[in-house]
Image (cartoon, rainbow, N blue to C red):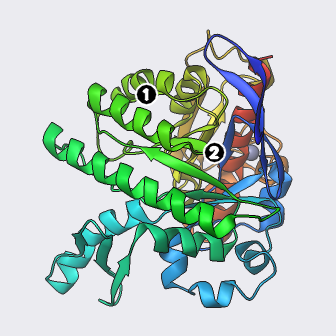
Amino acid sequence: MHFKINREAKTSRTGELRTKSGRVKTPLFMPIATRGAVKTILPSEIEEIGFEVVLGNTYHLSLKPGTELIKKYENGLHGFMNWKKSILTDSGGFQIFSLGARAKKRFGESGVKLTEEGVRFIDSTNGNKYFMSPEDSIQIQLDLDTDIIMCLDECPSYPCTQEQAKKSLELTTRWAKRCKKYFDKKTKGRKKKPLLFGIVQGSNYEKLRIQSAQELVKIDFDGYAIGGVAVGEPREQLKEILKWTLPYLPKDRPRYLMGLGRPDELVAGVVSGVDMFDCVIPTREGRHGRLFLWKDDPQKIDFKKQVIFFETINIKNARFKKDLGKLDEHCDCPLCKNFSRAYLRHLFDVNETLGSRLASVHNLTFYFKLMEALRKNNE
Ligand SMILES: [Zn+2]
């Protein structure tokens, strides 16, 4: 079996996921390498922080540079970006739908057209037209040779009516069946198989979340993702969506909460029984000079009791102008080890890219230490 639970608390669990690139500890956080790079950071640095999985984007990579080039490298995307550990690729569904609106604005026609067969969309950067079926999405991900492959789903925006959400999740389920069939056919007999995950939809409707989970479980995936969150719904809804969905997912398969979130949301996810996360927050916030700082030594925090365990600061703030102190006394990242707050503020002040690079490394280190502490907390 590819997923092993080592320890279970009430609902949370720590375990180990086996991909074709190796074993990874769960719960885990995946830095985002949308276009084959974690913005401004070397793969060796990502590995040094401790991360074992990064996330690539099927939509962006299939448009540029395209799979024809990436396929020429050993282990596909691994060789192309020189990352030997595991890679998860999303299906492209979320980007097609979210970037479709942008295309409409620029090129005056609907950016996305959905049919039973698949989705027609316009590249929002140049107006080129494309078509992607569920099978195409799987084939692209197989060509990228990544470790965890996601099914193509329709991700409805928020708010959406119950009727729209139902129609959408039923299409997602039919696509999920096609993805699985195609995946099985293409990987049959392979010794080193990637893992295929289905995506639970159903917006903020309990009945629909349950329906989606039950139907996907029948198809039998290697893991299950909870999609359609972080699309503009009130953030308090997250706990409800998890409460409705997780009991219907098999315990012995990994669960992945897509696109979330803030450190406190990661804690809520782990406590509910989620095993995998990804989010742009640590790197995006870092590039804007916003940093996460520990209130205490992360190894000593009891996350069940201590709700406020971090603070965020904006280093551009004038109060740091003459602050010779270390950024975070509980962090040993290259920024905290070698530079002061005043120096980091100066880098942002004069637009030196080293500033956003160091801040991203710090925030990613914060996220890694958080997951490490949560794994330890469960022991
Ligand atoms: Zn640091």
- Give the residue displayed 23% in from the left and 76% down from the top: 111
Name the side, left or right, on which 211 lies relative to 187: left
Expressed as whole percent of the image width and height from the top left, the position of residue 362 reads 70, 49
Q: Is residue 164 above or below residue 35?
A: above
Between 356 and 157, the one nearer to me in the picture: 157
Q: Is residue 142 above or below residue 199?
A: below
SS for dot 1 = helix
Expressed as whole percent of the image width and height from the top left, the position of residue 299 reads 80, 23
Expressed as whole percent of the image width and height from the top left, the position of residue 142 reads 63, 71
Looking at the image, can residue 315 be seen? Answer: no
Task: Count the numbered circles shown.
Answer: 2
Amino acid residing under circle 2: Asp
Looking at the image, can residue 232 be seen? Answer: yes
How packed mark 2 is, by other alpha carbons closer than 10 Å (few <14, some 14-19, many 20 or more), is some
Q: Which mark is residue 259?
A: none
| For marks 1 and 2 on the same chain, the one whose residue lies earlier in the sequence | 2
From the image, tell me which residue sits under label 2.
222
The image quadrant where one finds ligand 1 is: top right
Q: Quarter-wise, where is residue 6 in the image?
A: top right
- Give the residue displayed 39% in from the left and 65% down from the top: 95
Amino acid residing under circle 1: Thr
From the image, tell me which residue sits under label 1.
245
Name the side, left or right, on which 211 lies relative to 365: left
* Quadrant where the N terminus is found in the figure: top right
How packed mark 1 is, by other alpha carbons closer than 10 Å (few <14, some 14-19, many 20 or more), is many
SS for dot 2 = loop
